[in-house]
Image: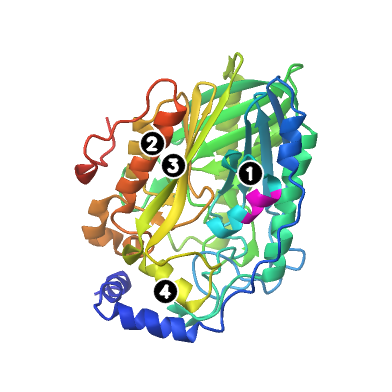
Amino acid sequence: MNADDLVRLLWRLPLWGPVTAAARFLGRSNRPDPLPPIPGPAPLDEFVKNAGEEFLAGAATRDITPENPDGILLGGFDFNRPCAGVRDPIYARALVLSDGKTPLVIVTLDLVGLSQVRTNRIRDRLTREHSVSILLVCTHNHQSPDTLGLWGPALFGLLPYQTGLDAGYMTWLEEQIVECVKSATKQARPVRLHLASGEFDKKDRWIHNERSPVRDRGLRVVHLADKGGTAIATLIQHACHPETLWKSNRLISADFCGACCNHVENKIGGVALYANGALGAMVTAALDWETPFRQRAEFLEGLGETLGAAAVRLVKRAKIVEDPSIQITRSEVHLPAKDNRLFSLVQALGVVESRDLENELVSEVSFVRLGPASITTLPGEAAPVLGLEILARVPGSPKLLFCLANDELGYLLPPEFFFDRAYAYESTMGPGPQSATRLALAVEAVASRASRDGGIRVRNPDTLSLSPKS
């Protein structure tokens, strides 16, 4: 029996109730401090009021590298992994759009994830009237501060007994995100929307799926330029875990996502944003685990520049959309609390920002129509087979998928994965076997409401097939 099998066995023991009760006792004095009151006013509401009827876009960046990084715990990989310095900075990158009626705010963050608790605070600071319009999308970067609380000190390296959150950094981070969006609204001006999609890395030279040959090779770009042709922003969407430097690295880095954005900005100007898609279970850089750091660093730059170059080529042949409109819908997703043992445990231990978990875990999905394009959001790391199936069922061209959007629930897996030993680890680190069906149904609801040309079809949610369509 390997370590993954052991974790899976412990997760399914009938003694789980007493284990959670004991964790609740141990964590009674270990909860993060209450979050401070939310300051006003709401900058997005003011932007909408003055936007006019033209299609507008503004973009901005904000450095979110900790000012004093030494000792801050990093998110991802092992528990209690203190930062030892900075290799390259991490950023918040904001794109603000308006079609004269509806705003859309996309903020990409070089972070491992944000909980819905923190997302809602940031939304409340930005708007009183348009919370559905705000998408906070983390790249799932494993070389960034722990912004979820899951990677603090752990008993025997297995059970976290102290949060990995740095309260000072989280307060400062929130402020930087708000200021980044405010700056983007101030720079908004009339633009043209350009869309394109293609494939990247067909032969798996740079990226592979460690568990399966299935992965989403789609590369999609949304490019905004003013009427004189000056680039305002380029949004790039692909799928790969930003963990290229691996767990021995303790230097903060934006990983290949930062290198990709740097290349695009250097070649065509404006602000580049990278959003991750179906990267779960387990899409990562095509490197052996034992590859030394120097080669990993070179590979990171190569992957980022190659991906960026592919995005630039797509921008050059992108089609202009005439008179684009924006439509946005959002829906809550309710997942059974009994399937969410990880969340039950970390909530009981008090290492994460507290959320209601009495009977159900509540999260969300969104669906956006941006002209003919669509954006579907999921609150975690979708397995490629799930991500591809959802994309096949929604309208739009191109179809973008944002994972880790407005929440992070861990791995989002098809039901059959929970009976496959190859996914022993992943099946313990997510919201359970009902999550795929419930997420698909929620996407069906929001896509049907937002789309002029119908929506998706889920004939029988009890027998939902999650095999990718040919």
Measured Cα–Cα span from mark 2 to mark 4: 31 Å
Dot 2 and dot 1 residues touching (CB under 8 Å): no
Q: Residue at x 69, y 46 (%)?
A: 126
In the displayed structure, does residue 34 sit left or right of residue 365?
A: right
Precedes in sequence: disc 3 or disc 1: 1
Q: Residue at x 59, y 63 (%)?
A: 147
Q: On screen, 382 above or below 196? A: below
* Magenta part of the chain: 121-125
Please tell me whether mark 2 or mark 1 is closer to you in this view. Answer: 2
Please tell me whether mark 2 or mark 4 is closer to you in this view. Answer: 2
Measured Cα–Cα span from mark 2 to mark 1: 24 Å
Precedes in sequence: disc 2 or disc 4: 4
Q: Which residue is mark 1?
A: 107
**Mark 2 Cα shell of 10 Å, populated few (<14), some (14-19), many (≥20):** many
Measured Cα–Cα span from mark 3 to mark 1: 29 Å
The three-letter code of the residue at mark 2 reads Ala
Q: Quadrant of residue 463?
A: top left
Whether residue 60 is visible to the viewer of this picture, yes or no, is no
**Mark 4 Cα shell of 10 Å, populated few (<14), some (14-19), many (≥20):** many
The three-letter code of the residue at mark 4 reads Leu
Q: Residue at x 49, y 71 (%)?
A: 78
Please tell me whether mark 2 or mark 3 is closer to you in this view. Answer: 2
The three-letter code of the residue at mark 3 reads Arg
The three-letter code of the residue at mark 1 reads Val
**Disc on res. 445:** 2
Location of residue 28 in the rendering, given as x and y in whole percent from the top left corner = 52, 83
